[in-house]
């Protein structure tokens, strides 16, 4: 027989009963106030039924029938509350039922004067009720107040009645008061240990939560950097072809919905292979960077988009631009690159590095796609090269 398995099942059953089936709602690292209140509520119900049952039998044998009846009714209320606490009803409702039923029972029994010592039920059940209703911190405070009151009455009988008129003194033997005080100190110590443990574990939870939040922030920042790297050309630090493909798809749909044109400029550095063969790839990379930054600085609107298309090719997207404005902008790009005056020892038409540009504009609709627009811009670039380079051609 597997003893450990039986012990585990018994423990789970006990926890399930003690917490009204809500054990899963406790904190992952320790007891929460919510969990503690459920345990205390069920503990009070179970222990209260046992105490009240004994109390009812003893008082019935003494002839105190009213007290026995009150205890029996309270037992029935506690049984109903125990069943009610295991439903989906809010926890405050059974808690209030327990508190009100015990208070009424103590008042009724004390008022009739039948049962001696019935008023001490307030002291037995007061702190746990305070914990359930107000939390562990208030329960400890309430316990300290009661300990102080009992201590004052023990050593200075009748003093409380003088200080607070109308307050009945705790008229009991010294040995009984000492036992009550010792029991109360034990209860207070237990509550302090539980509260200290809970707060310590809460601090651990807070520390671990902060660590997790920091790790989440670092992960978010890393993902953001990774996303930027995946969309940025590492040499020129402008957008890459993947980023352009994603962006033009979005702009195309927006333009089709708004019935506005889109313009694309395909750009190629003239005789760039010869430039690399003459001066080397290191100089070629420097020239690519310089031209990319030059064209990027010429962008006029936030919606304008420049990307490296591949090798020595670039592409510029001008959403909602008119044909005339797009053509003027393309000519400005061509002129600005030539004004950089980067020497080109193998260029056939100029001493400096130049570019050729092909411009195409289209009104998006369901009958075409941005692929057609790119093909048109590429065809215009081919015409610019055929007609002498260092120029922009629009079709």
Image (cartoon, grey):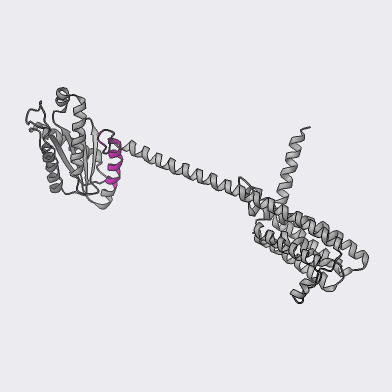
Note whether 145 is above or below 210 in the view shown: below
Tell me residue 117's x, y (percent): 84, 66
Give the residue displayed 29% in from the left and 47% down from the top: 253
Query: 164 or 100, which is in the foreground?
Result: 164
Res. 89 in view: no
Note whether 71 is above or below 224 in the view shown: below
Tell me residue 131's x, y (percent): 68, 59
Quarter of the figure that contains the N terminus: top right
Name the quadrant containing residue 109.
bottom right
Which region of the structure is painted magenta? Answer: 235-253
Query: 322 or 369, which is in the foreground?
Result: 322
Give the residue displayed 40% in from the left and 42% down from the top: 221
Name the quadrant containing residue 231.
top left
Query: 283 or 252, which is in the foreground?
Result: 283
Quarter of the figure that contains the C terminus: top left
Q: In the displayed structure, does residue 150 sit left or right of residue 231? A: right
Residue 249 in magenta stretch = yes
Residue furthest to the front: 155
Name the quadrant containing residue 71.
bottom right
Query: 136 or 108, which is in the foreground?
Result: 136
Residue 101 in magenta stretch = no
Note whether 61 is above or below 6 in the view shown: below
Q: Main secondary structure of the magenta part?
A: helix
Q: In the displayed structure, does residue 69 sit left or right of residue 196? A: right
Tell me residue 246's x, y (percent): 31, 40
Res. 53 in view: yes
Give the residue displayed 50% in from the left and 43% down from the top: 212
Residue furthest to the bottom: 165
């Amino acid at each position: 027989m597997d003893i450990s398995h039986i012990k585990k099942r018994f423990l789970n059953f006990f926890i399930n009963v003690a917490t009204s089936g809500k054990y899963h709602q406790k904190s992952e690292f320790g007891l929460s106030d919510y969990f503690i209140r459920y345990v205390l509520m069920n503990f009070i119900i179970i222990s209260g039924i046992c105490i009240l049952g004994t109390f009812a039998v003893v008082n019935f044998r003494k002839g105190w029938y009213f007290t026995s009846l009150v205890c029996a009714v309270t037992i029935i209320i506690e049984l109903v509350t125990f069943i009610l606490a295991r439903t989906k009803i809010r926890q405050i409702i059974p808690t209030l039922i327990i508190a009100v039923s015990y208070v009424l029972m103590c008042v009724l029994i004390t008022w009739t004067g039948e049962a001696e010592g019935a008023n001490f039920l307030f002291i037995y059940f007061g702190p746990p009720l305070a914990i359930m209703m107000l939390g562990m911190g208030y329960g400890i405070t309430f316990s300290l107040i009661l300990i102080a009151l009992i201590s004052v009455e023990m050593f200075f009988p009748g003093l409380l009645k003088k200080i607070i008129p109308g307050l009945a003194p705790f008229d009991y033997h010294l040995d009984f008061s000492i036992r009550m005080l010792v029991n109360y100190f034990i209860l207070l110590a237990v509550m302090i240990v539980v509260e200290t443990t809970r707060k310590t574990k809460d601090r651990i939870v807070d520390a671990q939560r902060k660590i997790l939040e920091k790790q989440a922030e670092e992960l978010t920042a890393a993902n953001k950097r990774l996303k930027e790297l995946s969309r940025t050309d590492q040499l020129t630090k402008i957008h890459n072809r993947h980023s352009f493909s994603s962006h033009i798809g979005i702009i195309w749909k927006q333009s089709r919905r708004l019935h506005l044109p889109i313009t694309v400029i395909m750009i190629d550095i003239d005789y760039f292979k010869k430039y690399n063969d003459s001066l080397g790839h290191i100089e070629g990379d420097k020239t690519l960077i310089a031209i990319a930054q030059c064209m990027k600085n010429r962008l006029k609107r936030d919606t304008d988009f420049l990307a490296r298309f591949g090798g020595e090719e670039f592409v510029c997207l001008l959403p909602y631009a008119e044909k005339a404005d797009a053509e003027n902008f393309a000519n400005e790009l061509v002129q600005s690159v030539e004004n950089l005056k980067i020497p080109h020892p193998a260029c056939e038409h100029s001493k400096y590095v130049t570019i050729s540009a092909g411009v195409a504009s289209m009104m998006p609709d369901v009958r075409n796609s941005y692929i057609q627009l790119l093909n048109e811009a590429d065809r215009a670039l081919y015409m610019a090269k055929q007609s002498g380079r260092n120029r922009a051609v629009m079709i």
